[in-house]
């Protein structure tokens, strides 16, 4: 992806997101869940489980995965793909952290 | 350069070991496989259905040749690639056509050979064994040209072969040396029922009879017996048993007895050589069922990957027969002796027989015929060594209780059609389960749960799912280790984790994971909430609760609903409310446009459909009206339900309402392994339904009856009577002591009912009723822990900004 083509939106600081937790960014196209791992990596997924639309932002974060609070589907934070044997995918958005500031792009990753 | 691993034997155990190894160490080895059969790896268990014409060879393939190519494995298969020599000094193997492969590690999975009865004529054309695809092909071929088959051997394998041949249109006689069929798995009574039912299907039996010769000249023509009698036959199947195939190992100087002797890491006496499967003798035992072999595979892979922590400690196995429409189950020692007792039910007209052998109030063995749905439960009780004295009087009637919900009262998988629902929670039909087992090659209950979701929620259909698995897969599909680990992140059990937390004074989840060498960096959604609870319970004053390790409901103190909104239930002590409280609730519902207001089963009012960001405001308003969190979301005290008692009721014997309020005021806010409900009834009419609560109190003229371990729901369980007490103070002390015992000893997510069934009512009585000092100490520990627990979480969040980030979006965009 060409850097200049991406619109990065400042959404807050790393400290605003609890470690092994998540916050929600509310957009006109729906909620986006922002996750922070134990190693301070940040990921962004469409806040809707591919199974029955559960809010992933409310799930338990472990490793680089999140468990949906409704029926325990597990999704990869880096891709939005369900962990086998479940099958499904939710949109994944680019995020970057620079000097403690978290920036999000609303263009889903291909 | 990669190390070299050579596998001899391309069967289920060996290839399963490779699969486990590739999962944990995909790039460690260059792998070469030698197999004597000219195929990829197939599911040997399903040869019976192939013989019976229910499946084709293609359908029972587990790994086709492409799989080996995809995983970079060199496969040599076929007769000429049979390994004939192992040169352990040069570390290489040599096949009959001279192919060689060097190894750093060698894995022997040579399986077993069918036992050939040593009688004249046993090598005549038309005499076959029942072991591999070639045998099945021979039998299918013979069934097209010939009419009369004799199967020698009335065990599991023989009966499956006989059934298959009968399905192919042959007239089949089973010859057995004993007078009971499957005598290693069945007692005489069950064996008789089995024989009768097979005879009704057209199978013939000739037993007891000892074969002395196979007769015929250029093809088999019959079988002769010790008493001189003869049976005509144009096909003879030898199915009298299998022997571990140890020839190659023995020739290479690897120590063998009945099988290749391996230790708890599946290593042989040559440290470079491992062995798994039917060829192995482990702690004096050889196994022929799939579940133990897969356990071995897992452990062996762990050591081949040089992780070095897994241990195989032997398996307890159970058997089921996979002949369509016949349900039988056996486990353990079902014969018994002078030290054991038997409980037997027999209803020959219904074709039903059950026998349980008990020793020291523990199940020692069981045989069932006709109705096997509780086999898994008995097997579990046997493995766990559970004391059954508390429920011995209804043990024979199985685990099901009056009012079981969720699977339409079905208890016979065999009589269900493919479209009938097995798992009511997740809407899974029988056909979907059968398809998943065959298409995806599943063998264990856990695998079926992961792939189909059947039996993965409430678990009430587990017996049915196991029946389906056994009808598809046959014997021994499941043999979990005696005590289950907390989750897949660790091998440690709940008890071990709790013990370490106390003994090592561990005070955080990372500390526990580090100390016990958790396999994942920060656990998973199963273990983190469990650890958080265990730490909280052990160190109420010191432990700092970890919000991120709590399920969402406990993190935000409300119940998540399917649309992502929440429900809010304010506490109403003992189910008693006031006009002011009701007005507050009504105002809140209006102000926040709460769509549904509902009365709950626990005598509370539920406000459903509250938006997450409104939660703190809703709580603030409820707090102002004098109400606190009702903890309807908590693994902890939920509600104390009461009747109006002697204050109003003409039958009331005690003030049940006041008692309920008092208990609720003292116990609210406590965290527990699972939800906990109480009720107080003012007389034995029991209007508060106290006998289906975790702790139920029924007033009588002379005092109070205390009942424990009940619940409504999926498996309705009525309480057991703990004891009777006379004073109000005693009710409180016993109640708090019981709660604390449950808090300290039950596994996370066990309600009181399964916990009591596991430890036994006698144990609970001993700790709470008989041991007065122990009771007082438990009670004190509970009261102490409540000092830190009774803080209204709603007020903290509504008025003191605790966990504020939970309730506001990080950012609004657009």
Image: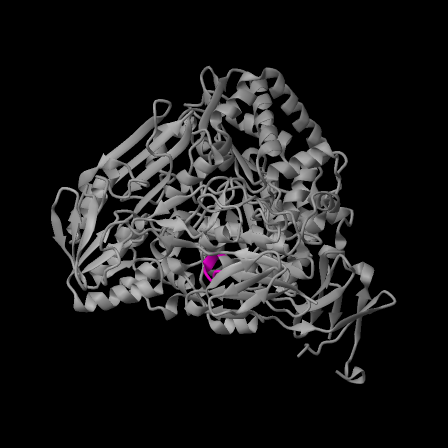
Instruction: Identify which residue, B432 or B562, lies in the foreground.
Output: B432
Position of the C terminus of chain B by quadrant:
bottom right
Tell me which segment is drawn in magenta.
B9-13
Relative image position of residue B458 (x, y in whole percent): 47, 48
Does the segment drawn in magenta span residue B544? no
Q: Is residue B12 magenta?
A: yes
Left-right relation of B188 to B542: left
* Image quadrant occupied by the N terminus of chain B: bottom right
Q: Position of residue B715 (x, y in %)?
A: 42, 42
Q: How many tags in the picture?
A: 0
Question: Going by the image, does B186 lie left or right of A89?
Answer: left
Percent x, y for residue B787? 72, 31
Seen from the viewer's position, the closer of residues B12 and B270 is B270
Which residue is nearer to you in this view: A47 or B748? B748
Quadrant of residue B795 within the rendered picture: top right
Q: Main secondary structure of the magenta part?
A: loop
- The residue at the point 21 percent across, 37 percent down is B347
* Residue A85 visible (yes or no): no
Tell me the quarter of the picture where residue B404 sits: top left
Residue at image coords 56%, 44%: B263
The residue drawn where x is 49% and y is 53% is B251
Question: Relative to residue B612, is residue A28 depicted above or below?
Answer: below
State the residue in front, A28 or B581: A28
In this rendering, the answer to whether B393 lies above or below B143 is above
Please indicate, yes or no, whether residue B784 appears anywhere in the rendered image: yes
**Rendered location of residue B727, percent (x, y):** 55, 16
| Left or right, B144 with reference to B803 | left
Q: Tell me: residue B384, above or below residue B241.
A: above
How are the residues colored? one colour
């Amino acid at each position: 992806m060409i850097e200049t083509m991406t619109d990065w939106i400042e959404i807050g600081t790393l400290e605003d997101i609890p470690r092994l937790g998540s916050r929600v960014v509310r957009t006109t196209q729906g909620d986006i869940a922002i996750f922070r791992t134990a190693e301070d990596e940040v990921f962004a997924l469409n806040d809707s489980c591919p199974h029955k639309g559960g809010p992933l932002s409310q799930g338990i974060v472990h490793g680089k995965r999140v468990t949906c609070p409704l029926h325990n589907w597990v999704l990869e934070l880096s891709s939005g793909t369900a962990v086998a044997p479940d099958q499904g995918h939710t949109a994944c958005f680019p995020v970057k952290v620079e000097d403690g500031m978290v920036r999000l792009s609303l263009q889903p990753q291909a | 350069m990669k190390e070299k691993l050579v596998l001899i034997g391309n069967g289920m155990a060996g290839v399963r070991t490779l699969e486990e190894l590739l999962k944990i160490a995909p790039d460690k080895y260059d792998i070469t496989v030698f197999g004597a059969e000219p195929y990829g790896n197939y599911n040997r268990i399903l040869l019976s259905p192939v013989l019976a014409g229910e499946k084709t060879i293609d359908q029972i393939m587990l790994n086709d040749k492409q799989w080996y190519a995809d995983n970079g494995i060199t496969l040599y298969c076929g007769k000429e690639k049979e390994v004939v020599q192992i040169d352990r000094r040069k570390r290489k193997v040599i096949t009959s056509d001279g192919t060689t492969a060097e190894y750093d590690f060698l894995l022997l999975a040579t399986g077993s050979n069918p036992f050939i009865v040593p009688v004249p004529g046993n090598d005549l054309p038309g005499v076959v064994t029942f072991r591999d695809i070639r045998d099945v092909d021979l039998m299918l071929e013979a069934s097209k040209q010939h009419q009369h088959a004799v199967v020698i051997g009335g065990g599991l394998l023989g009966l499956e072969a006989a059934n298959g041949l009968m399905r192919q249109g042959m007239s089949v006689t089973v010859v057995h040396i004993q007078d009971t069929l499957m005598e290693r798995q069945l007692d005489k009574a069950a064996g008789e029922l089995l024989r009768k039912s097979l005879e009704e299907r057209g199978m013939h039996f000739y037993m007891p009879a000892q074969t002395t010769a196979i007769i015929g000249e250029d093809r088999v023509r019959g079988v002769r017996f010790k008493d001189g009698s003869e049976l005509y036959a144009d096909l003879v199947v030898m199915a009298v048993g299998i022997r571990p195939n140890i020839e190659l190992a023995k020739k290479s100087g690897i120590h063998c007895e009945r099988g290749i002797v391996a230790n708890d890491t599946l290593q042989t006496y040559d440290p470079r050589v491992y062995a798994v499967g039917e060829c192995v003798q482990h702690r004096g035992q050889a196994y022929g069922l799939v579940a133990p072999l897969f356990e071995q595979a897992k452990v062996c892979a762990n050591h081949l990957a040089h992780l070095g922590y897994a241990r195989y400690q032997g398996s307890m196995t159970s058997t089921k027969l996979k002949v369509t429409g016949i349900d039988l189950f056996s486990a353990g020692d079902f014969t018994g002796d002078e030290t054991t007792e038997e409980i037997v039910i027999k209803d020959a007209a219904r074709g039903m027989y059950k026998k349980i052998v008990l020793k020291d109030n523990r199940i020692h063995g069981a045989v069932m015929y006709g109705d096997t749905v509780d086999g898994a439960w008995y097997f579990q009780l046997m493995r766990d060594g559970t004391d059954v004295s508390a429920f011995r009087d209804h043990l024979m009637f199985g685990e099901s209780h009056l009012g079981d919900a969720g699977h339409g009262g079905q208890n016979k998988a065999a009589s269900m059609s493919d479209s009938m629902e097995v798992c009511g929670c997740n809407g899974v039909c029988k056909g979907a389960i059968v398809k998943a087992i065959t298409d995806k090659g599943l063998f264990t209950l856990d695998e079926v749960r992961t792939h189909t979701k059947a039996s993965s929620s409430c678990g009430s259909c587990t017996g049915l799912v196991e029946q389906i698995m056994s009808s598809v897969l046959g014997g021994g599909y499941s043999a979990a280790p005696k005590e289950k680990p907390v989750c897949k992140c660790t091998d440690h059990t709940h008890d071990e984790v709790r013990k370490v937390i106390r003994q090592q004074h561990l005070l955080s989840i990372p500390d526990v994971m580090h100390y016990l060498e958790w396999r994942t960096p920060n656990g998973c959604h199963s273990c983190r909430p469990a650890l958080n609870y265990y730490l909280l319970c052990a160190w109420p004053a010191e432990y700092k609760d970890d919000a991120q390790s709590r399920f969402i409901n406990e993190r935000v103190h409300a119940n998540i609903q399917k649309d992502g909104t929440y429900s809010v239930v304010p506490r109403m002590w003992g189910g008693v409310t006031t006009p002011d409280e009701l007005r507050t609730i009504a105002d809140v519902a209006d102000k926040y446009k709460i769509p549904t207001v509902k009365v709950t089963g626990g005598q509370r009012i539920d406000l459903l459909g509250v938006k997450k960001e409104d939660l703190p405001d809703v709580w603030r308003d409820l707090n102002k009206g004098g109400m606190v969190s009702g903890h309807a979301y908590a693994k902890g005290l939920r509600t104390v339900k009461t009747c109006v008692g002697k204050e109003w009721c003409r039958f009331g014997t005690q003030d049940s309402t006041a008692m309920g309020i008092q208990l609720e005021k003292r116990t609210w806010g406590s965290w527990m392994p699972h939800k906990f409900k109480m009720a107080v009834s003012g007389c034995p009419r029991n209007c508060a339904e106290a006998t289906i609560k975790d702790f139920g109190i029924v007033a009588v003229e002379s005092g109070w009856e205390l009942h424990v371990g009940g619940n409504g729901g999926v498996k309705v369980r009525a309480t057991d009577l703990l004891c009777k007490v006379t004073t109000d103070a005693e009710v409180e002390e016993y109640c708090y002591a019981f709660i604390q015992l449950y808090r300290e000893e039950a596994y996370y997510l066990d309600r009181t009912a399964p916990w009591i069934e596991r430890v036994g009512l006698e144990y609970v009585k001993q700790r709470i009723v008989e041991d007065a000092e122990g009771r007082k100490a438990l009670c004190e520990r509970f009261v102490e822990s409540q000092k830190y627990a009774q803080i209204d979480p709603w007020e903290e969040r509504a008025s003191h900004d605790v966990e504020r980030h939970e309730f506001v979006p990080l950012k609004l965009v657009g």
